Amino acid sequence: MPTIDEAFAKLKGEGRKAFVPFVTAGAPDLEFTAVALTKLAESGAAVCEVGIPYSDPIADGPVIQASYTRALARKIKLADILATLGHVTPTLPCPVVTMVSYAIVFRHGPEQYVQMCKQMGVAGAIVPDLLVEEADDFAAICRKHDFSLIQLVTPTTSRERQKRIAEQTTGFLYYVSVAGITGERKELPPELADNLAWLREQTDLPICVGFGVSGPEQAKQLKDLADGVIVGSAIVRRIAEAETKGKDWALNEIGEFAREMVAALA
């Protein structure tokens, strides 16, 4: 399995942009999560993001919140999630990262969390509630273990603060396209292009755009502005329908969606 740096270097050499899909661990169950990751990777995902269910999510919209609630109702545990990832990551052609609250990291111990993830083949973590002012120690742990700490920049983040976040980030920088929660949106904000252009001048890190990206048309708009797009709600919504339409239907849906997104970013 390539590292995040290797994945983006390969894409750059091929003149392509990254499609980064998000799935909730354990929704509808961990067996399906493993199969979904395999399907998304086979369909061209550059990096796969796995949400660790949390009872008090910071920025997740109703679709992802509902998936967390369903997973937690099944008493899902971090150890079970990581064990599942440990089985599937060696088989994937792309790296896997976790989206995780720092409360979970802190409860298990920052260094232990990183070590557990590394042992299971996980390449990095996105920690949306970790403030840049409080992230130095965890960033040092991540660097020591060659584990990417992917941090978020929002439209309301001051430019000085954006620079500090970029300096602390490894792997890629997660740019939140809108001020608000995750979810599918029909249009991207008009100021997004200028914001990304400015940020591009401040860092050599790949920049991926998430929150509100819901389909190929938006991906086409972003492919000349960013290094990749992150899509969560549009995938989680399709997976949620597995309970009524069947798991095979959901797998086919997310596979087709992934191929459309990859083609739009080519």
Image (spheres, rainbow, N blue to C red):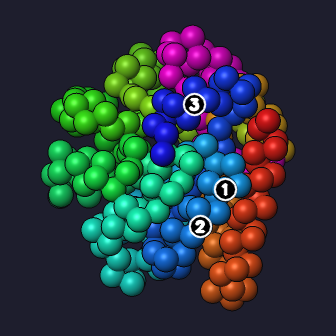
Precedes in sequence: disc 1 or disc 3: 3
Residue 237 visible in image: yes
- As helix, strand or loop, the secondary structure at mark 2 comes to helix
Residue 196 spot, x, y in % from top left: 63, 23
Q: CA distance from mark 1 to mark 3?
A: 17 Å
Q: 195 or 29, which is in the foreground?
A: 29
**Which numbered tag is attached to residue 36?**
2
Q: 174 or 204, which is in the foreground?
A: 204
Q: Nearer the viewer, mark 1 or mark 3?
A: 1
| The magenta segment | 192-216
Question: Looking at the picture, which amino acid does disc 2 mark?
Answer: Ala
Which residue sits at x=30%, y=48%? 118
- The image quadrant that residue 171 belongs to is top left
Q: CA distance from mark 2 to mark 3?
A: 22 Å
Precedes in sequence: disc 2 or disc 3: 3
Which residue sits at x=40%, y=29%? 170
Residue 261 spot, x, y in % from top left: 76, 48
- 64 vs 242, left or right, is left
Residue 158 visible in image: no
